[in-house]
Image (tube, helix red, strand yellow):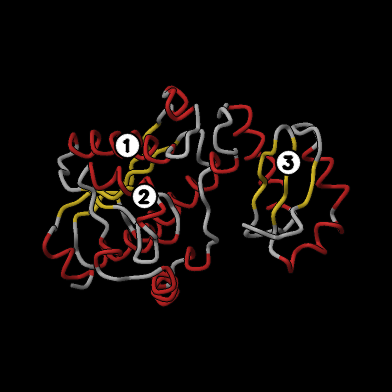
Amino acid sequence: MNLNDFFKQQKRMALAFSGGVDSAYLLYAGVNAGCDIHAYYVKSDFQPQFELEDAKKLAKEIGAKITTLELDVLSDSQIVSNPVNRCYYCKKMIFGKILEAAKADGYAFLIDGTNASDDAGDRPGIRALQELQVRSPLRECGITKADVRKLSREAGLFTWNKPAYACLATRIPTGMEITFEKLYATEISEKALTDLGFTDFRIRLSEKDAKIQVREEQLEKLLLYRKEILEKLKPYYSSVTVDLEVRL
């Protein structure tokens, strides 16, 4: 089965839209196939502002319907405690919110951007999607992340080379309580590095310290901007370190 066949089978559907590479292409493909597809973006403390801006920009460029939903993820103690399977509880909450809004709008069928490269065995969030009967057409059609980037580039989508971006909660070590202050510090600090021209990086929390992880080719640049980085990050962290193992 290919994507066009999928959209022909279900001509009216809701899409859990993150503004990332996968869901962006899925939204484009649905619109291009003549499907009545409605994108739902969930804004919470786990998503940085630029993701919402990208989502709105992409939807506008391709003429897609989009609705933004507000969600207080920190109201759930199971999420805040940050267990190993936190993503399961988070996905249940987020997709439950989307399903509620979509059904109220007349959409009973929900899809997401999980692709064929995603390892279901290592992603507790996928179990939540299965329980909620969310379909993943990219995965079902055997479309990998590399395929999505290639197809997105051919389609002229600005998201085609957008770096993968996990939610802000992933910067906080498992078992450490998630708070608004920690998430805010991460968002502000990562934006500071983005403004300096860094791409595809993470700022991880270790106790009260910031650990910067960049690709090897950007290590030299970190030293070049050392003073500027310290100035931006020190108000939020006791110390700022660099992960020399360059792991992301």
> Does residue 234 appear left or right of residue 126 in this picture?
right
* N-term mark: 3 or 2: 2
* Front label number (3 vs 2): 3
Residue 120, how many percent across, how many down? 35, 56
Q: Position of residue 171 (x, y in %)?
A: 60, 42
Tag 1 near tag 2, CB within 8 Å: no
Q: Which residue is mark 1?
A: 92
Q: Residue at x 39, y 61 (%)?
A: 118
Is disc 3 surrounded by few (<14), some (14 to 19) or many (20+) residues within 10 Å?
A: many
Horizontal arrangement in the rendering, residue 166 relative to residue 155 (left or right): right
> Which residue shows up at 31% across the image and 39% down it?
95
> Can you identify the residue that label 2 sits on?
17
Q: What's the amino acid at mark 2? A: Phe
Q: Is residue 175 above or below residue 124?
A: above
Pinpoint residue 35: horizontal percent, then vertical percent: 19, 60
At numbered mark 1, what does the secondary structure look like: helix, strand or loop?
A: helix
Q: Residue furthest left?
A: 9
C-alpha distance separating marks 3 and 2: 30 Å
Residue 210 — which label? 3
Ranked by sequence position, the earlier of labels 1 and 2 is 2
Instruction: Name the residue located 19 percent from the left edge and 64 percent from the top edge.
Output: 34
Q: Secondary structure at mark 2?
A: loop
> Is the residue marked by circle 1 packed among few (<14), some (14-19), or many (20+) residues within 10 Å?
some
